[in-house]
Amino acid sequence: MSTVLRSASCPVGKQCPEVESVEEGYEIVGTNIPDPRLPEHERRVRVPHTMLPELGGLEIADFEAWLEARRTSPGDMLRVQTRAAYAVPSDDEDFAGYLDGAPEPLSTHREPFFDELREDVARDRIWRNLVVLDGEPTSYQRYANEWVYTYAVAAGQVVRVLDLDRHPSARVLLRTGDFWAVEHQYVAVVRYAEDGHHQGEVAVEDTSATGYIAAGELAWDLATPFTEWYADHPEYQRRTLVA
């Protein structure tokens, strides 16, 4: 049994776009758009924006502005990172240098980020970063550990590592993906292409945000402070850092 939740007219005047609620979830009927990238059993359909007006406000055009509109002083912000690698242009120079054996990072993008962290500390804004580790660190994660998180902690960021080998029940976070939780109230999911390139953020509706926030806080409680975790794993370090 299915229930029609919404329907709308096609440009030719026929009642073709339709959203139905079925036992397995939702089915959307719309104008067929052939797409050779899809498997034979899949079809991509297009429906008017007017059919799902509540979704329009979830796209975040300016994420920095979205954050600033919601952050408070004092305040709290949690970033959950679940990917094994990120394709971030500001990392390219340093990551390549790290792999090539360069003695230290040189990117001009670093200090503005660390200055932002110091400004947050001065304004009593807590910026937490949860790194989810699934098995041994990838080369990107080793780079981030040594050349990003070590310095970020010194600048005031609170970083923890959640090792899924120690806490396998937290593996569900890999399905949740990356997200931000701001002031224990607002959530934005971060989207990435398969190759790790950033594709923007989408706001999560209030009714769903509580689930993300709860998952993030549970994972945070299970995680180990970065400095402690990193000191316990010299085998993951390219070199031994001297405090």
Image: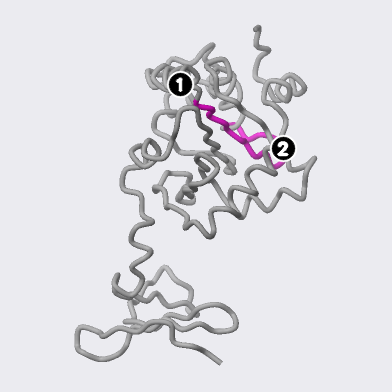
Amino acid type, callout 2: Asp
Q: Is residue 129 magenta?
A: yes
Disc 1 to disc 2, how far (Cα)? Answer: 24 Å
Amino acid type, callout 1: Arg
Q: What residue is drawn where x is 77% and y is 48%?
A: 168
Which residue is tagged 1? Answer: 123
Q: Is residue 157 magenta?
A: no
Q: What residue is drawn where x is 78% and y is 42%?
A: 165
How far from the left and from the top, in percent, is residue 30? 35, 82
Specify start and end residues of the magenta stretch as a single range. 125-139
Which residue is tagged 2? Answer: 221
- Looking at the image, how many numbered discs can be counted on the residues? 2
How far from the left and from the top, in percent, is residue 112? 39, 19
Q: Nearer the viewer, residue 50 or 36?
A: 50
Quadrant position of the N terminus in the picture: bottom right
Q: Nearer the viewer, residue 163 or 39?
A: 163
